[in-house]
């Protein structure tokens, strides 16, 4: 049962303590898709796939993850875009406090597969300088776009603004694809392994949480696969009925109440993360709804 | 300790998923506690099954199903043991009780405002009945003696209700789910209780332990609250509330049943619940139940059928004692 008066506040909070640190809290809730801000571009082919799969499915399996204060979507850009395209007014969200230190913002590095000359050719379109890898400490390139190929490192010259850097990155990626290079997205750790196997690696510039919020609020979206958020725990398999989210006849407050009852009927299990289920979950814990 | 079994198939032909899911579902029905969940992911040719590790017999049954349906496909198994798998949340019984006690305490601490004349009249009548209630003064002096604010009292009651399961996460979640308290308010109240030596908090062990004097005090508070509730039922029959109650019964609320919600009159909720509970229920006649509903739904316009049934079942057991 829930209060529905003026000071009524709805949330279903799940909390996790990590020793004396500030606890990590997620609130499962319903949000209007129009009130959310996106920070990354969508990949049209992924969006089409997702729409087709949502049309077949009767439930939304996992909530998207949103910063409660700014309403910026941290995880679930494609799901929000799919909902907008399909005309669904509401979406299931897990609100988090993005300023919590336990939420890590990481990057996707790129592995470039294909003719080696293509990389050099694509680089001709941007200002860059070439160095030997033995002459440079890689950590100083944390804010730069750099391609590591064999023993050489090509650092792309760009404006200080992160958004501009990512715009150059987008262009560079387009040129690489045009020249027959296929791109795989990998974590920083995986990139090192691939490089040691002789692959060509594209390092992306560091981005901060403040950048993510600022650009999203300005409706300036970064290219796909710019950010990789790792949360202390992640709710999965909520399986909320899509027909409830698609109907504009149901008021939002009513939907939130239904969600609360829906969740109370389920068992929430906290299991150890870093596990492959339908994909690899990097989080330390998963909150599985059964 | 649960174990995650992940079976990866070299292919997932059409029709394979449905027969696999059907067989696993049947097995889950036979072993609902042992098989925690399973999920098939056709696009990755994968089945993930979370089950209790100590039941090797169930693991064998799962493997037999996988073998029988997979037949000619090769299967790779990944094991993942979830050392810290833990059931989150609180059970319905505790949720039901804390909801009843909180509803009573709401009236005790401050009368809910209502713009509707009939609602206000009913709340006034309930208050008159409460004032006439002899245990109220005893309850009041007890709460005064404990010196707790409403929030502190509710947090302490949540701790008391959870007993051995009172890890900090569960206390916070119970207060949030049943009482709509934000986790910051719960933590603040816990810190305040700790500063007065009423509870001990070990953040690193994720535990909150109430002191013996607090447990004794809370036991008395719960006893008196329940006695108040019983007396209140009696006073409904004495007071002429029938006209008021039948008017209130026409108020519309949303009843949530699973994932569906429908608008329904309060008296219809009563009828439905009574029909479902009979012949086991000796708790309430119509007016008692209507009053209870009103207490619980004073300013609440949404009623969850499952929670409500739990509340009434608990009160039924209680009325027999």
Image (cartoon, helix red, strand yellow):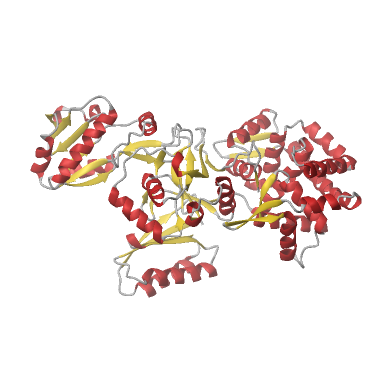
Residue A66 lies, in percent from the top left, at 44, 40
Relative depth, front residue between A27 and B56: A27
Relative depth, front residue between B115 and A117: B115
Numbered-mark total: 0
Is A99 situated above or below A256?
above
Whether residue B313 is visible = no
Residue A38 lies, in percent from the top left, at 38, 39
B203 sits left or right of A53 in the view: right
Residue B142: quarter of image: top right
Which quadrant of the figure contains the C terminus of chain B? bottom right
User: Residue visible at 14% across and 27% down?
Assistant: A135
Residue B14 lies, in percent from the top left, at 34, 70
User: Residue visible at 59% across and 33% down?
Assistant: B184
Relative depth, front residue between B205 and A188: A188
A41 sits left or right of B189 in the view: left
User: Residue visible at 52% across and 33% down?
Assistant: A20
Relative depth, front residue between B170 and A261: A261
B4 sits left or right of B210 in the view: left
Whether residue A259 is visible = yes
Residue A52: quarter of image: bottom left
């Amino acid at each position: 049962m829930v209060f529905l008066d003026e000071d009524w506040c709805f949330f279903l909070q799940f909390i996790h303590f990590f020793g004396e640190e500030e606890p990590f809290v997620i609130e499962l809730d319903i949000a209007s898709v129009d009130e959310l801000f996106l920070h990354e571009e969508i990949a049209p082919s992924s969006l089409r796939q997702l729409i087709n799969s949502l049309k077949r499915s009767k439930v939304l399996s996992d909530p998207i993850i949103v910063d409660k204060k700014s309403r910026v979507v941290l995880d679930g850009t494609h799901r929000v875009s799919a909902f907008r395209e399909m005309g669904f007014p509401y979406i299931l969200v897990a609100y988090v406090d993005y300023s919590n230190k336990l939420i890590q913002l990481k990057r996707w590095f790129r592995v470039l597969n294909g003719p080696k000359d293509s990389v050099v050719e694509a680089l001709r379109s941007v200002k860059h300088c070439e160095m030997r890898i033995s002459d440079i400490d890689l950590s100083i390139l944390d804010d730069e776009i750099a391609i590591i190929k064999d023993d050489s490192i090509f650092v792309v010259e760009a404006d200080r603004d992160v958004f501009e850097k990512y715009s150059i990155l987008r262009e560079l990626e387009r040129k690489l694809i045009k020249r027959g290079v296929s791109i795989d997205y990998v974590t920083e750790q995986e990139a090192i392994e691939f490089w040691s196997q002789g692959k060509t690696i594209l390092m992306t510039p560091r981005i901060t949480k403040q950048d993510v919020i600022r650009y999203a609020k300005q409706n300036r979206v970064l290219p796909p696969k710019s950010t990789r958020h790792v949360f202390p725990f992640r709710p999965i398999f909520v399986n909320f009925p899509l027909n409830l989210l698609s109907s504009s006849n149901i008021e939002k407050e009513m939907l939130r109440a239904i969600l609360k009852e829906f969740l109370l009927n389920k068992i929430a299990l906290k299991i150890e993360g870093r596990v492959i289920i339908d994909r690899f979950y990097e989080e330390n814990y998963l909150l599985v709804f059964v | 300790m649960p174990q995650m079994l992940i079976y990866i198939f070299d292919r997932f032909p059409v029709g394979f998923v449905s027969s696999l899911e059907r067989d696993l579902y049947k097995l889950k029905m036979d072993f609902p506690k042992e098989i925690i969940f399973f999920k098939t992911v056709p696009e990755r040719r994968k089945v993930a099954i979370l089950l209790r590790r100590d039941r090797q017999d169930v693991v064998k049954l799962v493997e037999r199903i996988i073998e029988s349906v997979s037949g000619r496909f090769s299967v790779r198994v990944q094991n993942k043991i979830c050392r810290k798998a833990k059931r989150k949340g609180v059970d319905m019984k505790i949720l039901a009780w804390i909801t009843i006690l909180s509803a009573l305490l709401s009236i005790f601490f401050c009368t809910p405002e209502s713009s509707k004349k009939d609602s206000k009249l009913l709340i006034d009548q309930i208050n008159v009945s409460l004032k006439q209630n002899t245990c109220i003064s005893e309850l009041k002096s007890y709460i005064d003696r404990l010196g707790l604010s409403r929030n502190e009292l509710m947090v302490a009651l949540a701790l008391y209700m959870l007993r051995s399961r009172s890890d900090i996460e569960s206390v916070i979640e119970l207060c949030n789910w049943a009482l709509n308290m934000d986790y910051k308010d719960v933590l603040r109240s816990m810190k305040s209780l700790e500063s007065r030596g009423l509870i001990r908090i070990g953040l690193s062990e994720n535990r909150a332990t109430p002191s013996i004097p607090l447990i004794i005090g809370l036991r008395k508070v719960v006893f008196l609250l329940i006695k108040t509730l019983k007396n209140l039922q009696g006073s409904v029959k004495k007071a002429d509330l029938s006209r008021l109650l039948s008017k209130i019964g026409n108020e519309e609320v949303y009843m949530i049943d699973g994932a569906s919600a429908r608008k329904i009159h309060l008296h219809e909720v009563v009828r439905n619940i009574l029909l479902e509970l009979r012949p086991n229920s000796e708790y309430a006649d119509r007016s008692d139940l209507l009053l209870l509903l009103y207490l619980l739904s004073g300013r609440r316009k949404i009623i969850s059928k499952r929670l409500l049934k739990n509340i009434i079942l608990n009160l039924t057991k209680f009325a027999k004692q």
